[in-house]
Image: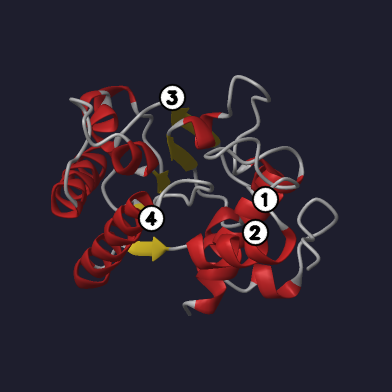
Amino acid sequence: MKIDIYGGMTNELKDCDLFSDLQSGRSVCFLGDSITNGTETDGIAWCHPLVPYITGPKSNFSRGGWKVKDLLDHVEEIPPAEIYVIAIGINDVLFPGSVQSAYTPSEFTTRCGQLADLLLAKAPGAKIYFIAPWTFVDLGDDYLKRGDQFRNYLGKWCEETGYSFINPDPVIVSVLEKEGSERFMLNEFHPGVPDGVALFSYAVLKADHDQK
């Protein structure tokens, strides 16, 4: 499969709501954990390939290890924006024993709703995209099941409340199953550079297109 983000944006990938919003000239803020912040090893965020296509002001508010509760705790520091792209949850899924973690899919989704309310109070009229908790590799079935539960619960809630929801997991998993994870993954959780972050960005736009 050809991933054509670094070399150019295909028409299929352009034909989605997120890409249109990135090209709208409105301000964009990415929120998340180390996958959005960029790992200490490479410092490249999953959304790095999308940055050249953003025509308005852009910001990134994310930290390694963060869970949705951390975004809630630091919400006053989040810059106002007209579009928020929130990719959070993998650490909630993987570390249920952490004091900051949402233990259940319901608790996680409730916290996402609280975050959305606070962002809209900060930036009335902002558009909010929730990216489903990222996939991971080489972990047990219990973690895989837990990840699917979190993604499904968040997706249903977004459908009910009108928030934009993008689940790139099936696209990522399909590519990893066909081509192996070594080319794309730095470790069990983080995409590598350049192919991994290209895949994650591709998967987000492809999933958004396919959901139309």
Q: Which residue is mark 3?
A: 63
- Colour convention of the picture: secondary structure
Comparing labels 4 and 1, the label whose residue is closer to the camera: 4
Q: Residues within 10 Å of mark 2 (few under 14, many from 20)?
A: some
Q: Is residue 19 visible?
A: no
Residue 18, horizontal then vertical, whole percent: 52, 61
- The residue under the point 59% across, 42% down is 46
Circles 2 and 1, Cβ within 8 Å, touching? The answer is: yes
**Identity of the residue drawn at 85% across and 55% down:** 7
Mark 4 or mark 3: which is in front?
4
Q: Name which of mark 3 and mark 1 comes first in the sequence.
A: 3
Q: Which residue is mark 1?
A: 181
Which is more N-terminal, label 1 or label 4?
4
Q: Are marks 3 and 1 in contact (CB under 8 Å)?
A: no
Q: Position of residue 5 (x, y in %)?
A: 76, 56
Residue 82 placement (x, y as % from top left): 41, 47
Q: Nearer the viewer, mark 2 or mark 3?
A: 2
Instruction: Give the residue number, with chain letter if any, for mark 4.
Output: 141
Label whose residue precedes the other's in the sequence (2 or 1): 2
- The reply to whether residue 156 is visible in this rendering is yes
Between 85 and 111, which is closer to the camera in this rendering?
Answer: 111
Q: Amino acid at mark 2?
A: Leu
**Numbered circle sitting on residue 57:** none
Residue toward you, 128 or 27: 128
Q: Amino acid at mark 4?
A: Asp
Which residue is drawn at the image coordinates 52% and 39% (left, top)? 189
Give the Cα separation between the discs numbered 4 and 3.
Answer: 27 Å
In front here: 112 or 190?
190
Q: At numbered mark 3, what does the secondary structure look like: helix, strand or loop?
A: loop
